[in-house]
Image (spheres, helix red, strand yellow):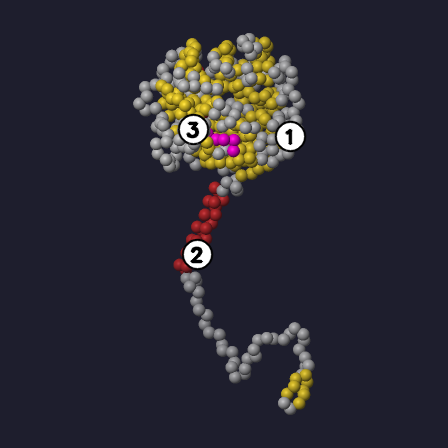
Amino acid sequence: MARVTDVGVTSTPAEPYGSETLLPRRSAANPVAPPGKARRSPWNRGRDRMIAGAIVVVVAAVVAIVAATSDNLHTSRALADQPHALPSPPSAVPGSMTQLWQAPSSATPIPIGQSDTVTTADGSEVAGRDPLTGQIRWHYTRENLQLCTVDAAWGRVNAVYHKTMGCSEVTQLDPATGRITAQRNGDAELGTRLVSDGSHVTTTGKHLLDTWRDDLVKSMEYGKVPFLQNANKQPRPNCTYGTVAVAADKIGVIERCPGDRTDRLTVYKATAEHEDEPKVTYTALLAGKRARVIAMSGDLTGVLLPDQKLYVVYGADGSQKAAYPMDLPASDVATDPAGGTEATTRTAAGIYWYTGSKTVALSRDDLSPRWTLDGTLGPGITFATQLVVPIRGGLAVLNETNGATLRTVGVNRGSYAGPIRLTALGPVLLEQRGPTVAALR
């Protein structure tokens, strides 16, 4: 490169490309001053280090608590494809049945079989199983929560989990794939059961009944409402409840209220203009205490009055339509049934009620008793076009019209001798034996 000056042209060596410095050159007259003593950091004192350490500990503790209580971190899922179609059920109940498999399922009061899948629920896990092998196809698990109850409605599975004070976490699942279809927080009590009329589901309880639509949106609440916002909306919030039954978008409940000398039957609607303001169809004092609402059909409600040894049918306005003698063993009526629901089933021809020692057939038309079979272990269902009822050592195949035993089928249940609930799924018959589900074919 060439540099032009006043006295002529001189040459200087060129610096390599890209090596030019853009910093100003220091003048020899202004040498760099020696560095002075660095200022001491205010965080070098022992007290400051202790404060910083305490902050770290608190942050770590908060992170640990969040991690320990986070629902997402403690929820695991595995989905499945649509299951293969099951074979058709046989034309008649087989002469013998063999157990295919069994699995723990303490949270299902009744076996769940739908969409060619068996759903079991135990501890924290809801699982969809192959009906023929018991192999798990999908699961939904909340490791930090325990299941309260699981039941089927609207062709879906509703899993209710215990959190804090009650059974407040509800997840609805597609039984075929395990896909979540809805979720909600609720106020159901410990020990709750789910009862469905086909349109709505109601949670049972001693102080509060909640009713949901199929998308789990609350449509009605009845009783002692937590976090009450509008006073004087509930008719008798200080009562306790016995048994509950549902039908035709109505809920029937036995109430035991301060000041009442006997039990009370109340029927109210599953929906109203305001969810916290029940629309009561009727309420009536009964003839005695320890009453139990057994079943509902249309506008009719069947109630057992054990002290009077009567079974009474009430009409749409609460008036008595009919009364029938019903003398049950003391052990059958000593206490309200678990979860506040009677063990009943429905077929196309009738309603079947297990009292604890016998099965009573009721008419779907007028709820009148039709026949009684002693020595049973549960209500009946239709399997392979026939009515089957669990008995000791197996199943009884019955004439649905008069209750006559057509034949019996042996089933080896090992040492289990308690109540049995049945569900049919294609060629497979499911038995709920206490905390276990067993599949038979």
x then y, percent, for residue 187: 43, 33
Q: Which amino acid does label 2 sit on?
A: Ala
Question: What is the residue that sits farthest to the bottom in this orientation?
Answer: 7
Side of 410 relative to 45 (left or right): right
Q: In which quarter of the image is residue 339?
A: top left
On the question of residue 124 being in view, the answer is: no
Count of numbered circles in the view: 3
User: Which SS class for mark 1?
Assistant: loop
Q: Which of marks 2 and 3 is in front?
A: 3
Q: Does 378 appear in magenta? A: no
Image height check: is 124 above or below 260? below
The residues tagged by marks 2 and 3 sit, at their Cα atoms, a distance apart of: 51 Å
Asked if the residue under mark 3 is in contact with the one under mark 2, i.e. CB atoms within 8 Å, the reply is no
On residue 52, the disc is 2
Residue type at numbered disc 3: Leu
Reading the image, the residue beneath label 3 is 209
Q: Which of marks 2 and 1 is nearer the N terminus?
A: 2
Looking at the image, which is closer to me, 76 or 170?
170
Relative to 275, say whether 332 is above or below: above
Disc 1 packing (10 Å; few <14; some 14–19; many ≥20): some
Horizontal side of residue 245 vs 389, given as left or right: left
* Residue span colored magenta: 210-215
Does label 2 or label 3 sit earlier along the sequence?
2
Q: Can you give x and y, in whole percent of width and height, for residue 267 in the image?
A: 42, 23
| Residue 103 occupies quadrant | top right
Residue 83, disc: 1
Q: Which secondary structure lies at badge 3? A: strand
How far from the left and from the top, in percent, is residue 98? 62, 19
- What whole-number distance in Å separates the C-alpha atoms at marks 3 and 1? 35 Å
